[in-house]
Amino acid sequence: MHSVRLRTYGQAFATALYEIFSFAATFYTPYMLNAEYGDMGLNIGYFYFGPTLLIWVLVFAFVPETACLSLEQIDKVFL
């Protein structure tokens, strides 16, 4: 969650990154599966396991726990 002042820019940046990476994945995945180019077959799951594991580690490291906090305490966390 971005601060109120930067929320528009943060959301726009996150959306732009999502669009770039989703386009890249939909572009290169058929080449990775094609027998003439990558021929990875079912091993493509190992490829996608790497970025997924990295994302899990980053989320665990950088997203704070807010389950038992009041709204005032959450505001202090994000300040």
Image (cartoon, rainbow, N blue to C red):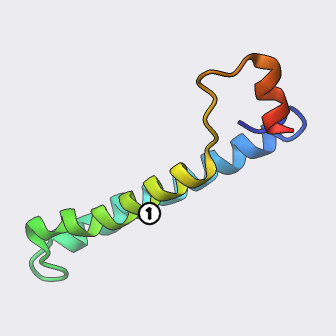
State left or right for residue 52 relative to residue 65: left
Give the image quarter of residue 76: top right
| Residue visible at 27% across and 69% down in the picture | 47
For mark 1, give the secondary structure: helix
| Residue visible at 29% across and 62% down in the picture | 49
State left or right for residue 19 relative to residue 51: right
Q: Is 33 located above or below residue 3 in the figure?
A: below
Q: Is 57 located above or below residue 66 in the figure?
A: below
State left or right for residue 30 relative to residue 75: left
Judging depth in this view, the residue of 25 and 10 nearest the camera is 10
Q: Position of residue 15 (x, y in %)?
A: 61, 45
Q: Give the residue furthest to the right.
A: 5
Name which residue type carries label 1: Leu
Q: Position of residue 74 (x, y in %)?
A: 76, 27
Figure disc tally: 1
From the image, tell me which residue sits under label 1: 54
Q: Residues within 10 Å of mark 1 (few under 14, many from 20)?
A: few
Q: Is 32 located above or below residue 3 in the figure?
A: below
Judging depth in this view, the residue of 21 and 3 nearest the camera is 3
| Residue visible at 87% across and 38% down in the picture | 79
Assign the N terminus to one quadrant of the image: top right
